[in-house]
Image (spheres, rainbow, N blue to C red):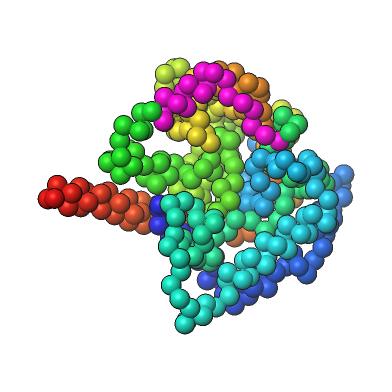
Amino acid sequence: MNVNLSTSLLLRHCAIGAAVLMLFAAPLLFPAAAQTPASDTEEWEVPRTPYGHPDLQGNWTNATLTPFTRAADRAPVLTWDEVAEIESGQAEIVAERAAPSDPNRPPPPEGGTNPICIDSPTSCYNEAYREPGERVAVVDGEPRSSLLTHPPDGRVPELTPEGRQRVEERRAFSRQFGAYDNPENLPLASRCIVSFGSSAGPPMLPNYWYNNNYTIVQNADHVMILTEMVHDVRIIRLGEPRPLPRDFRPWFGDSWGRWEGDTLVVETTNLNPAHPFRGVPPSQDLKVIERFTRVDEETILYEFTIDDPTTYTSVWGGQIPFKRFDDLLYEYACHEGNYSLSGVLSGARYQERMEARR
């Protein structure tokens, strides 16, 4: 597990100080329906850059309590009572974990192997380092039960036979080695190569943990998206695509954008086969289509579509509101704080030496 302590979170939480409990308890004080924008969208005009393009610039966050896929017992749209229950429940959990600890408490139970430690918070990060989101995602006035919206069941489609074979081949290759035989066996995020989960994408998804924040900068023919997590940067070129050779596959693929009305449409191909998405290595046929639409002063509607006929049995995708983030982003010094990588590797070598002496 990467034990880097994000400078961003430390500085942000220091600024919160003693007000942290009131901040996280806000959903208990205000009804969920009050979260919907009060402004009249018919009167609002899309701000534009000097080049005439819709202005997407600034800091944004996609942190949310809405899960990526839909639970079997949920409808596509939540009731406002369900929203209030989810948000107030999260606020209560955060307030409880942020409360002062009893100095006479016994040692916490031994932690498991889950690097995210969701079910065993005492064995992982303190609550001060978490920032998973406080609100359910609302799109077109509808509180959503999942970010994935198509297919209609809100679930990722089944893999094709070729897709399943690719996953099994990757697993079979990994089984040749011990978990800590060499750094290449560890996840890319643990090695500080790319963002945790799919923060930088594409598609750009919340990681439900921390640092779900982005900075967007535009000029006449480029859009730059800086991801706070591992400070990944995507450079999206605008204009007539000049695709890379098929076998040239960067970490974030080959992205080209165009404006369709007030929507930025980005098509990405050539994603790196060593960068799996939700455990599935991308094929050479994968195309990710993203749409960025400024819908009000505080929101960019981000939509994504996954089109990979050799991997999935159907096209699928979803919608995520990116909300304005009125705070600063700082460098996520991943490599500099990644003491665990050398620790687990040197620990494994020590175990091997001890076993060799028996």
Q: Position of residue 199 (x, y in %)?
A: 54, 43
Q: Is residue 240 left or right of residue 144?
A: left
Q: Is residue 267 left or right of residue 342?
A: right
Task: Tell me what residue is drawn at x 59 percent, y 18 percent.
Answer: 309
Q: Position of residue 190 (x, y in %)?
A: 40, 47
Please tell me how many numbered marks the rendered image carries.
0
Task: Tell me what residue is drawn at x 56 percent, y 34 percent.
Answer: 202
Q: Which residues are magenta?
A: 154-171
Q: Position of residue 63 (x, y in %)?
A: 63, 51
Q: Residue lying furthest bottom in this view?
A: 104
Front one among 169 and 141:
169
Q: Is residue 328 above or below residue 140?
A: below
Q: Is residue 13 left or right of residue 345?
A: right
Q: Main secondary structure of the magenta part?
A: helix
Q: Is residue 193 above or below residue 343?
A: above
Front one among 347 and 249:
347
Q: Residue lying furthest front in this view?
A: 358
* Quarter holding residue 338: bottom left
Q: Does the magenta segment cover residue 159?
A: yes
Front one among 202 and 297:
202
Q: Position of residue 117 (x, y in %)?
A: 50, 56
